[in-house]
Image: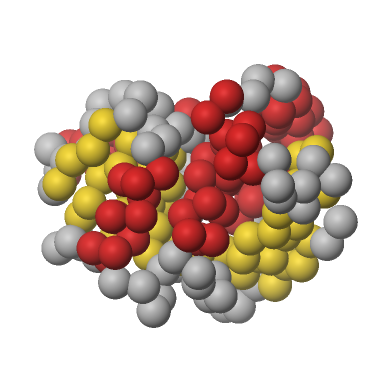
Amino acid sequence: MRVHETAQGASAVDIPTRRMALRAGLCLVAAMATPIPAFAKALATKPNRELSFVNLHTGERLKAEYVHNGAYVPSALRAISVLMRDHHNNKIHPIDPHLIDVAHMLHSRVRSNVSLNIVCGYRSPETNAMMHEISAGVAVHSMHIQGKAMDIRLPGTHLAALKKTALALDLGGVGYYPEDNFLHIDTGAKRHWVA
């Protein structure tokens, strides 16, 4: 297992309490035990999976092998959850491992070798409510609140090409936001939209 973390100009981060870490660990165990059949065939040939991230709000970077020998690596999943925390209040919630798999497949299909830029990962209910008040484009029951959605950019890959590839995966939701320059992916029902 390799987990490399660096912070570049990131502000101080609240260290998760034992209770938060235990809750996150229990949620990760439940998510890891619930395979999604559509992923099984696509990922069977990749027993080791690694992905690099950059949080655009904190500047933090992470390169993690989150699957090793066909099994999710809990420490890597926790590190990804910390990186993808709500940057407004530093609240941490487990990120759905299947969402990371979707991001990995998308990253592989476009044959990129750059880090996935995270515009938004987890969003706390408080932050989501605040954003919903500002923009009708933010869903009241956003999948971001559940750790099952991320908004991304991939430098070097045109956003329209990223959207086309995500739609071809035919897994979960795909939201295209060309004016804000990001793509939303989630592990909910198959659907797509343009902002």
The residue nearer to you, when weighing 14 against 48, is 48
Q: In this view, does 174 lie above or below 58?
A: above
Where is residue 10, by image quadrant? bottom right
Residue ID at (69%, 65%): 63
- Indicate how the structure is coloured in the image: secondary structure
Q: Please state if 126 lies on the left or on the right of 101 as rendered.
A: left
Quarter the N terminus occupies: bottom right
> What percent of the width, then of the height, locates residue 168?
35, 46
109 to 39, vertically: above or below: below
Nearest the eye: 89 or 115: 115
Residue 175: image quadrant is top left
> Residue at position x 23%, y 38% from top?
192
Q: Can the viewer see residue 123?
A: no
Q: On the rendered structure, is 97 left or right of 2? A: left
| Residue 135 appears in the figure | yes
Q: Is residue 27 above or below residue 65?
A: above
Instruction: Tell me where residue 64 appears, x and y as whole percent.
Output: 72, 59
Whole-percent x, y for residue 60 in the image: 59, 68
Seen at 76% across and 67% down, the residue is 4
Q: How many marks?
A: 0
Q: Residue at x 69, y 59 (%)?
A: 50
**How far from the left and from the top, in percent, is residue 152?**
39, 58
Q: Nearer the viewer, residue 74 or 190?
A: 190
